[in-house]
Image (tube, grey):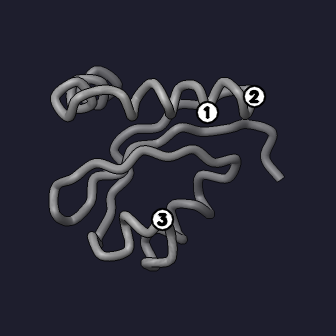
Amino acid sequence: MENNYYVYILECGDGTLYTGYTNNLKRRLLVHQQGKGAKYTRGRQPVELVYEKTFLTKREAMQEEYRIKQLSRNQKKQLIEKEK
């Protein structure tokens, strides 16, 4: 098991963005790609990882996930571009 937590943003096949957190990014991404992830992403295949950030604690990751979810689509796009 990994000791880090990750906040990630997926771009869905319909162009929408999904934000989540996990302690195993590889496994979580695979689950999303198989259409078994979050209800939101199931019908919006394919999904592509466009942003990820690592945290040491679950609390920090959950706080950042919440913060990102409050952003507008344009602000999320700016965040993604800034990290490229």
Q: Is residue 70 left or right of residue 29?
A: left
Residue 45: quadrant of the picture: bottom left
Q: Position of residue 63 (x, y in %)?
A: 58, 25
Residue in the picture at 74% in, 26% down: 56
* Residue density around tag 1, few if under 14, some if 14–19, many if 20 or more, within 10 Å: some
Disc nearer the start of the sequence (1/2): 2
Residue underneath mark 3: 38
* Residue density around tag 3, few if under 14, some if 14–19, many if 20 or more, within 10 Å: few
Disc 1 residue type (three-letter): Met
Judging from the image, what secondary structure is the residue with disc 2 in? Answer: loop
Q: Height in image: 59 above or below 15?
A: above
Residue in the picture at 27% in, 70% down: 44
Q: Position of residue 43 (x, y in %)?
A: 30, 76
Considering depth in this image, is 17 or 40 the residue closer to the camera?
Answer: 40
Q: Is residue 65 left or right of residue 23?
A: left
Query: Mark 3 and mark 1: span between their CA atoms?
Result: 16 Å
Residue in the picture at 70% in, 47% down: 23
Cβ atoms at labels 2 and 3 below 8 Å apart? no
Considering depth in this image, is 67 or 80 the residue closer to the camera?
Answer: 67
Disc 3 residue type (three-letter): Ala
Query: Mark 1 and mark 2: span between their CA atoms?
Result: 9 Å
Residue underneath mark 2: 57
Residue 19: quadrant of the picture: top left
Q: Position of residue 35 (x, y in %)?
A: 43, 78
Q: Height in image: 39 above or below 69?
A: below
Looking at the rendered image, the quarter that the C terminus falls into is top left
Disc 2 residue type (three-letter): Thr
Disc nearer the start of the sequence (3/1): 3
Considering depth in this image, is 66 or 1 the residue closer to the camera?
Answer: 66
Judging from the image, what secondary structure is the residue with disc 3 in? Answer: loop
